[in-house]
C-alpha cells in the first residue's frame, strides 16, 4: 500500500501503488505547468471527520511513497481520465482511491 503525504507533517493518505503512480503523473504534470488545484478525499476511519480538501501548489511538499521498489506501469487512458476530471472541475477528488484503516490495523478498500 503506497502513501501520499501532503505538507510533510500531515497523516499519509493510503493508496494502492498502481493508482498512486497514475496520480503522481497527473499531479506532476499540473505542478510542472505551475497549475495549482484542490485535492479532496474522505479520510480513513478514525481520522478527521468529514471531508478533507488541500490546496496543491508547487511550493508545498508532496511525497509519493510506494510499497514496491519496481516502477508501476502507466496506462495513458487512465491518466487522461483522471486529468479530464481534474480539469473539468479544478479539483482532484480521490475518494475512490483512498484506503480505509480497519480497527485491527489492516487496510481495506473503502
Image (spheres, helix red, strand yellow):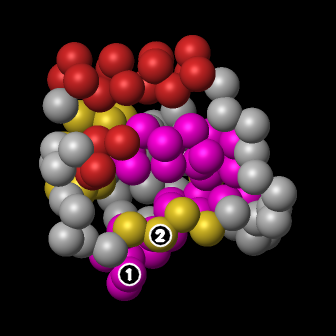
Q: Earlier in the sequence, mark 1 or mark 2?
A: 1
Start-end of magenta stretch:
1-28
Residue in the picture at 29% in, 28% down? 86
Q: Is residue 21 left or right of residue 24?
A: right
Q: Is residue 54 left or right of residue 95?
A: left
> Which residue position holds label 2?
63
> Which residue position holds label 1?
8
Q: Residue furthest bottom?
A: 9
Tell me the element at label 2.
strand
Q: Is residue 49 left or right of residue 12?
A: left
Q: Nearer the viewer, residue 108 or 35?
A: 35
Badge 2: how crowded within 10 Å, few (<14), some, or many (20+)? few
Residue in the picture at 46% in, 17% down? 81
Badge 1: how crowded within 10 Å, few (<14), some, or many (20+)? few
- Residues at circles 1 and 2 in contact by the CB criterion of under 8 Å: yes
The quarter of the picture where residue 55 lies is: bottom left
Amino acid at each position: 500500500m503506497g502513501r501520499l503525504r501532503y505538507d510533510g507533517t500531515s497523516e499519509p493518505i493510503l493508496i494502492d501503488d498502481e493508482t498512486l503512480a497514475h496520480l503522481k503523473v497527473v499531479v506532476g504534470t499540473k505542478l510542472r505547468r505551475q497549475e495549482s488545484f484542490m485535492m479532496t478525499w474522505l479520510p480513513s476511519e478514525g481520522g478527521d471527520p468529514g471531508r478533507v480538501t488541500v490546496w496543491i501548489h508547487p511550493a508545498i511538499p508532496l511525497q509519493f511513497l510506494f510499497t514496491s521498489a519496481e516502477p508501476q506501469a502507466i496506462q495513458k487512458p487512465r491518466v487522461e481520465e483522471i486529468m479530464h476530471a481534474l480539469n473539468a472541475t479544478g479539483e482532484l477528488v480521490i475518494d475512490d482511491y483512498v484506503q480505509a484503516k480497519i480497527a485491527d490495523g489492516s487496510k481495506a478498500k473503502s
